[in-house]
Image (cartoon, helix red, strand yellow):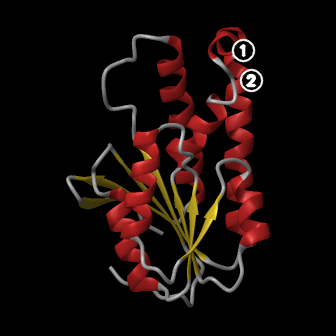
Amino acid sequence: MIYSLNEKKSILLLGGARSGKSHYAQELAKQTAAKVLFVATATAGDEDMRLRIENHKRSRPAAWRTLEAPLNTGKEIEAGIEDEQLVLVDCITLLVNNIFCRYDEPEFDRVEDSVLETEVIAEISGLIECLRKIEAFFIIISNEVGLGIVPDNRMGRLYRDILGRANQMLAQSCDEVYLLVAGIPLRVKAQ
C-alpha cells in the first residue's frame, strides 16, 4: 500500500507478538516517505531486551533518525521532530509497560488501579495531541493482548485492560486501523 504525503494521516497497527506489525510498519514507512523519525519506546532492562533492540535497529534503514522516548512520548516527538515527513512509533505496548515499571513490586501492590489508568490515559492523550499538532504522517504500533486467556494475576489483568483502553483511544483518533495476523494486514477502520 502506498500513501501520499499530501494528506496528513495516522495509522494504528495492532496485532499479537510476532504478527508482523513492525515489519509491515517499516515497509509502509519506506514506501511512503524518505525522511522518517523512528520513535522507540523500548528500554533495555535486561540482556535479552538489549539484544532485541540492537536487532531491531539493524533492521531499520540507516537514514532514519531514532528518537528514544520511553515516557512523555508526545512531548518528546514535538520537541524532537525536525524535517521528518513520517513518524513511526514502536510501540504503545512498551510505553504502557514503562508506566507500570515505574513502580517496584511492593509499591505496585499498593497502587490503585485508577492511578495507573489515569497515568496511561494522560500519556496516550499527550500522544493524540501530538498527532493533531504535528504535520507529519504517523504510524503507531501496539499489541492486541486481549484475545488470550485471562491473566492469573492482578498486574497482568490490569495491564491487559489498560492497554486495551489505550488502543481504543488511539483507534478512535487514527484515520486507519489494521490488525495484523500472520503478517497479513486486515483493515479494521478506514478513513
Q: Which amino acid, mark 1? A: Val
Picture coordinates of residue 88, whole percent (x, y): 53, 67
* Label 1: few (<14), some (14–19) or many (≥20) C-alpha neighbours in 10 Å: few
The residue that disc 1 covers is: 111
Q: Is residue 99 above or below residue 58?
A: above
Of residue 2 and residue 73, the one placed in the foreground of this image is: 73
Q: Could one spot residue 109 in this view of the protein? A: yes
Residue at the limit of the structure toward the front, as seen here: 47
Q: Residue at x 58, y 52 (%)?
A: 41
- Toward the viewer: 21 or 7? 21
Horizontally, residue 15 falls left or right of residue 184, namely right
Could you tell me which secondary element the residue under label 2 belongs to?
A: helix
Residue 135: quarter of image:
bottom right
Q: Secondary structure at mark 1?
A: loop
Residue 168 visible here: no
Q: Residue lying furthest left in this view?
A: 182
Whole-percent x and y of residue 191? 48, 69
Distance (Cα) linking label 1 and label 2:
7 Å
Horizontal and vertical percent for residue 104?
Answer: 66, 19
**Residue located 66% across and 9% down the image:** 106
- Residue designated by label 2: 115
Left or right of 40? Residue 178 is left
127 up-or-down from 94: above or below:
below
In the rendered view, does 162 fall on the left or right side of 71?
left
Q: Say few, some or many: other residues with alpha carbon within 10 Å of mark 2 (under 14 / 14 to 19 / 20 or more).
A: few
